[in-house]
Image (spheres, rainbow, N blue to C red):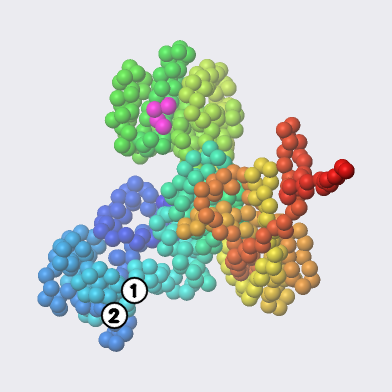
Amino acid sequence: MLHRSRAFAAEGGAPVEILTFDNFRDYPDIRKTLTEQGKLTGGVTLRNIWEDLASLAGDAPVLPAEELTGFTPLGETGTPVTSVEGGPSGRTQRFAADGTTLLQTDYLREDGSLFLSDRNDVDTPGQHGGRSLTLCNAQGLPVEQWRSSWEMYRSWLDHLTDGHDSFFIVDNKHAATFMKTYRRPSATVFLMVHDSHLATAVDGPASPLSGSGDVVVPRFDNFDGVAILTRMQAEDIRARVGDIGNIHVIPNSRALPVQPVEGDRDPTAGVLLAQLRPLKQIDHAIRAVTDVNHRLQTTATLGIYGEGDEGARLESLIQRLGVSSLVQLKGHTHSPARVFGESSFSLLTSSSESFGLVILESMSAGCVPIAYDIHYGPSSIITHGVNGYIVEYGNEQALAECVAAFLGLPAEQKATMREAAISRAVDFSDAPVVSMWSEALTAAAASKAIPAPELQVAVTDTVWGTWSDGALELRVTARLTAESDSLDADTPRFLCRLRIRGTESFFRASGEVTGHTAEGEFSSVFRFGPDVMQALSEYVVDATLETQLLGRRVSSRLPFRAPVPSPMDVYGTVHGNLSLRPLRPAPAPSTSTANAV
């Protein structure tokens, strides 16, 4: 996020503000540290709502008492309060009788005046329930009041933009839950997906969502645009939730200094940069490099840069394998370009990624990447055998053999691969990626500016059936009524959503329009594959038709119509052939009785 902001400012010539909503942080110290590290440069500023609130009141008129709800500053009540230090302001707090339930926090300016009173017992004094946040001027008098923190956040964003055209890129899943509610004609809001949306991709696009995916994927529709790092992930997302036209593939970028192909590079040195946590599976890399040296009799070392909870366990593994002279944990580095520039190859053994930015950093330094074939990232960047290597996921033996094979290449062939790696990294340099962002943001803003017509949708028929492979097919007919000539100006798009009842999780399929009449009646076919039906098999699921036309989207529940009963039963014979038989037992042959005389 910091790098993208710098690239926007440098390549696009537009100032970028990084907006934060949290409290209790020392932002002057954060700015100082980021500036010293070169991560906060000219054109990029860091702005926090809690720093701004104290001056936000300005010369606003004082609110009359009848418009206020629950404004009782702590300094005026005589109620016992607790003083709190830290954060951008001083604070006093009031607790319930249990001593632990926080009921009110008053925020003070440096001169001791009240600038915000946050009360949480508006409904019944002394009991948690009902909120009011009251902004005060320099005299401590109320000038604005909100009933929730999100209302306050939206007011701050309105203050910052002042009605001018603005672009927001949301990098945090928690902020996404709020920013999906910020809908303004002049504000274009993009969601940036940094991680894989799947916990594991073993079942393809229908695999279970990850923790972050469960938060953001159901909310994609609420954003003007969603940026996905790789084409493969974007295709899987569209296969899961349909394509409503707001998904854009935009990779991460890096400023790529030209690196010498060989220079002072150690020809046997490998490097791995990652957080030391289970997801990164660094133990795979340790065992593979051990195998290279012991079984394959090829000299290789591995420097592991990063910090995390797995440090002690990984160090124990290194000692147990007896490779402490070959494999070393080196802690965090602020100079990844230098580390890659001194190394011959890099390893990526993660179980999940969304892009693999570390691969790009490695390639830009001429350090040849060797990566597991995972969702998502490596195969979108690396061409196997040309500028790096892709190894079967989880196959440590194949990983070791790939490292040994690379180290055994002639020097000229290694140099060719390093040059190819650097060339590939240039595709992800700042200028072309900023251009992708410019196109996506411009298109989203232009689409947002199109007036949405009034649209009514009446579903007139629903026909359903299942296929032998377990897929579900729905045939839906709907009559559209739109204002003026909207149906002539654009072709409506139809999607069918299967939502798990009681949740926000869903699968959605785009419809194939099979016909339409001059009266505005459209027929569409939707197919949900067997993988989707298997993923939904344990839940109650509700079906909805979504109709889109010129920026307007209408949701309609699908009416149920029982299939016309068939007089025949379709069944499989003992030989596996298709046959038909009556649903009702065949009548017994008529018989007659004769009496002999």
Q: Can residue 316 be seen at all in this image of the molecule?
A: yes
Q: Position of residue 376 (x, y in %)?
A: 53, 40
Residue at position x 46%, y 32% in the image? 348
Viewed as shown, does residue 145 lie left or right of 368? left
Which residue reaches farthest right?
Answer: 597
Q: Is residue 70 magenta?
A: no
Could you tell me residue 407's position as x and y percent? 50, 19
Please name the residue shown 34% across and 18% down the image.
321
Most prominent secondary structure in the magenta stretch?
A: helix
Q: Is residue 426 above or below residue 111?
A: above
76 to the left or right of 400: left
Which residue is rendered at x = 30% and y = 65% of the image?
A: 50
Q: CA distance from mark 1 to mark 2?
A: 9 Å
The percent position of residue 426, horizontal first and vertical second, equals 55, 41
Q: Are marks 1 and 2 in contact (CB under 8 Å)?
A: yes
Q: Nearer the viewer, residue 61 or 223?
A: 223
State which region is magenta. 281-285
Q: Which residue is labeled 2 in the image?
A: 69
Identify the residue at horizontal 77%, vertical 41% (top origin).
Answer: 579
In the depicted structure, whether residue 128 falls above or below residue 573: below
Q: Quadrant of residue 293?
A: top left
155 to 430, vertically: above or below:
below
- Residue 416 screen position, x and y as percent: 58, 26
Amino acid type, residue under disc 1 in the picture: Arg
Q: Amino acid at mark 2?
A: Thr
Q: SS class of the residue under badge 2?
A: loop
Quadrant, the C terminus? top right
> Would residue 577 be found to the left or right of residue 188 on screen?
right
The residue singled out by tag 1 in the image is 147
* Label 2: few (<14), some (14–19) or many (≥20) C-alpha neighbours in 10 Å: some
Q: Nearer the viewer, residue 378 or 70?
A: 70
Inspect the magenta stretch and tell me whether residue 284 lies in it.
Answer: yes
